[in-house]
Image: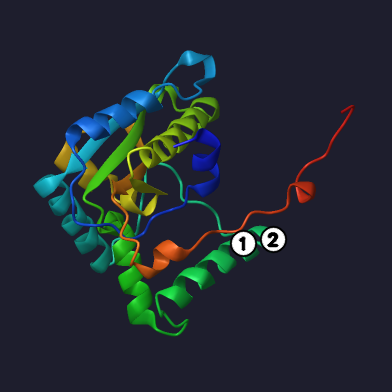
Amino acid sequence: MDLLEAIKSRKSIRGYKPVPVPKETLGRILEIATRAPSPLNVQPWKFTVLGGEVLDKLKETSEERYLAGVEPHPDFEREPALTGVYRSRQVELGKSLFQLMDIAREDKEKRNQWMLKMIRFFDAPNAIIISIDEEISGPLFVFGLGTVSDTIALAALDFGLGTIIEQAVVYYPEVIRQFTGIPESQKIAVGIAIGYPDWDFPANRVQSTREPLANMTSWHGV
């Protein structure tokens, strides 16, 4: 896929076919992603790739934690409550998703089921956990986790795959460590669900809006 086409067409995928992604394909995507911009060439990212029974057990255990009322406690702080225009953008996306999924605002059960689906990597057949050594987890290097995550999402399109980058899947880092062996010395940052998109799944029709360039750009001497 042409790079510019990939950038413009990429979207978060929330429904997947139950078809595992070949290990070779996942490896090729990660190999490409290692060329992502890296501040000072530190390459702070570490990848843990999941599938099969291991991923199933991880999903199940995380879901059990949430249903038991365990407060999420990711290694990185959860984002603060948004206000103003940022909250408006968040609400706009949520409304679009819930309308397509027929989830009424007052339907607590359906909203809770949607949250569980998020925690289960949206039932994707494979997942990639990205972590970073605690000793180099300053803001500059955490930025590198963003660049590599974006590169994974773009590279996946060339293989007919979809992705969604999530924090909800790392709400319980002890669960991830239980099934992967990621050491305490690594901070677990995000998880990426990856698989073949199910285009019949309603939420996959959402294309989030973007603010006009003029509203967020100033020009000086150009």
Identify the amino acid type marked 2: Val
Q: Which residue is mark 1?
A: 89
Q: Quadrant of the N terminus?
A: top left
Residue at x 21%, y 42% (from the top left corner):
21
Provide the secondary structure element on which disc 2 rests. Answer: helix
Residue 205: x and y, percent? 45, 64
Location of residue 195 with respect to 221 vertically, above or below: below
Residue at x 48%, y 14% (from the top left corner):
41
Residue at x 35%, y 69% (from the top left corner):
114
Q: Quadrant of residue 83?
A: bottom right
Q: Quadrant of residue 49?
A: top left
Location of residue 8 with respect to 117 vertically, above or below: above
Identify the amino acid type marked 1: Arg
Residue 85 numbered tag:
2
Alpha carbon separation for disc pair 2 and 1: 6 Å
- Circle 2 residues within 10 Å: few <14, some 14–19, many ≥20: few
